[in-house]
Image (tube, helix red, strand yellow):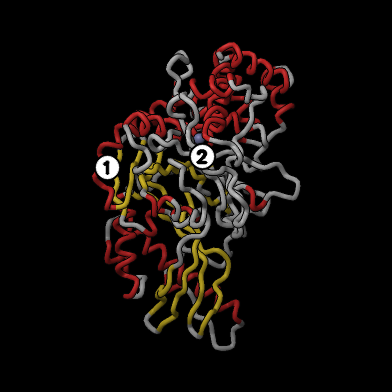
Amino acid sequence: MRPPGPAPAAPTFGTAPANVHMGQPNQPPGAPLNPYAPQQPGQPPLFAPPAPPQGNHGRSVAIFCVVFSLIVGLGAFTVGFAIDGGATGNIGAAAIPSPGPDDPPEVRAAYLSAKAQVALDDHSNALLIDDEAGWLEIFDDRLHDDMSQQFSSLRNLEVSQYDYTIQGDPREVNDGEWEFRLAVSYCFGGVIGEECADAAIVFDTVWEDASDGLIINQVEDSDEAGPRPWEVEDIRAVSGDKVIVATPAKYSDQLEEALPEAEAAAENADQYAVYGEVEKYIVYLAGNAEFSSWYGLDGASMDNVVGFAMPVPVLDDDGRLTSGGYEVVMHIDRVRDSLEFRSTMRHELGHVATLHHSGDHYPVPEDWWMVEGIAEVIDHDPSVGLEDYLRKRDVQAYVDQKLWNGELEAVYNSDDALTGSAKYGIAMYAVYYLFNEYGKDKFMDLFERVARNGEDAEAATQAAYGMSYDDLVAECADFIESLT
Ligand SMILES: [Zn+2]
């Protein structure tokens, strides 16, 4: 990532909300910190605001992006229970027998679920066939303005799948009013009716069981990596073969310029998507307000972050949330020139290509340099010499000032701008060395084991390189010292 202008920005991971899918909050006691994941609310940020650049080494290539970690499979998602077996969308409304007055509450709940699922299927079908009136039919009139905006945002994002499942049983919250927790699996930019790499949201709704049918009269924002931009903004979008670039209407004049950069970055990143194809890269352009409110980041310390890659969950066959792909958000005001924009885009899409659909795991401390190093290498290109590498001067200064301890260390909250940038640069050099010395395949094997699956770094290094982790780091360190 690049700094937003002359005064370098530093990464300020920090006080993220207690979204359970993100890194630290669900770490067991004693678990290693994941330096690129946000921490619990109330904790100090992992990254302090940067010190101004010192000396004459020019503009520090400041940082950084945030790669949020998706930690699942260990109770991290709060809604990981199976879909209620009573809900099915495969029967017509007329076929659902009404409960009698003496039936127990669970019979009524099952009846309402079945009826709601039928209505939801009609509702989502209306979206896919561009029938706005049909989409709105399920909502109380008071919601029509918001849901009309959501309809057009989803259409602009080329929605190609929008499947509802009801999570658990509905709960009666008032007389005649029922709360349903809903999940939606959606795809953008695919072909309707064909399989696609979906993402999921889950959110609460309140329905009124009125005499003329079930009506939704309350819709909450989604709460697992939510709200997504299209839930809360009037989204405009442009698309190419590989990327959909989207933004709130007020920034829509930026879209045409961003698309070719994003397409080129995606084509570049695709070379590293060795763990599975990224069907569509989703990139949002955001200003200040959106940057720290989408994806549950309200309250997170994002003041100096210029972009982030956010994992978005998917629903598995049992209706449980599990790890899925990544969506990217770029801060349009902080990426001030085309070089920064291009570089940031290439770095972020590099994260998407290498991390999407990772296994569910807790991160290990050693994966920071692999994750950021590969993203830097993807941006720079491993076949290109290092003479013009943007952080070269920062690494040089860091080594010259004897600040480097020879390790491949993550960035910490106490790091100033030079240290932060140099650590990114050192991570890049390490991955660059491993690519050029041992080939891409071995590194991608190591990356899969450690960064994607959370395997022990020692065992993974032995398996991928036939040497100890310490020896691998020492080799990388020798290379870095030879450059400086
Ligand atoms: Zn990054």
State the count of labels: 2
Mark 1: secondary structure: helix
Q: Left or right: 147 with respect to 71?
A: left
Task: Give the alpha-carbon distance from disc 2 to disc 1, as whole Å.
Answer: 28 Å
Classify the position of the N terminus by image quarter.
top left
- Vertical position of residue 50 compared to residue 219: above or below: above
Q: Amino acid at mark 1?
A: Gln
Q: Residue at x 45, y 70 (%)?
A: 116
The image position of residue 337, as x and y in percent, is 32, 33
Residue pointed to by mark 1: 254
Q: Which mark is residue 50?
A: 2
The image position of residue 256, as x and y in percent, is 25, 39
Is the residue marked by circle 1 packed among few (<14), some (14-19), or many (20+) residues within 10 Å? some
Residue 325 visible in the shown view: yes
Mark 2: secondary structure: loop
Residue 277 visible in the shown view: no
* Residue 263, quarter of the rendered image: top left
- Vertical position of residue 151 compared to residue 28: above or below: below
Q: Amino acid at mark 2?
A: Pro
The image position of residue 230, as x and y in percent, is 37, 55
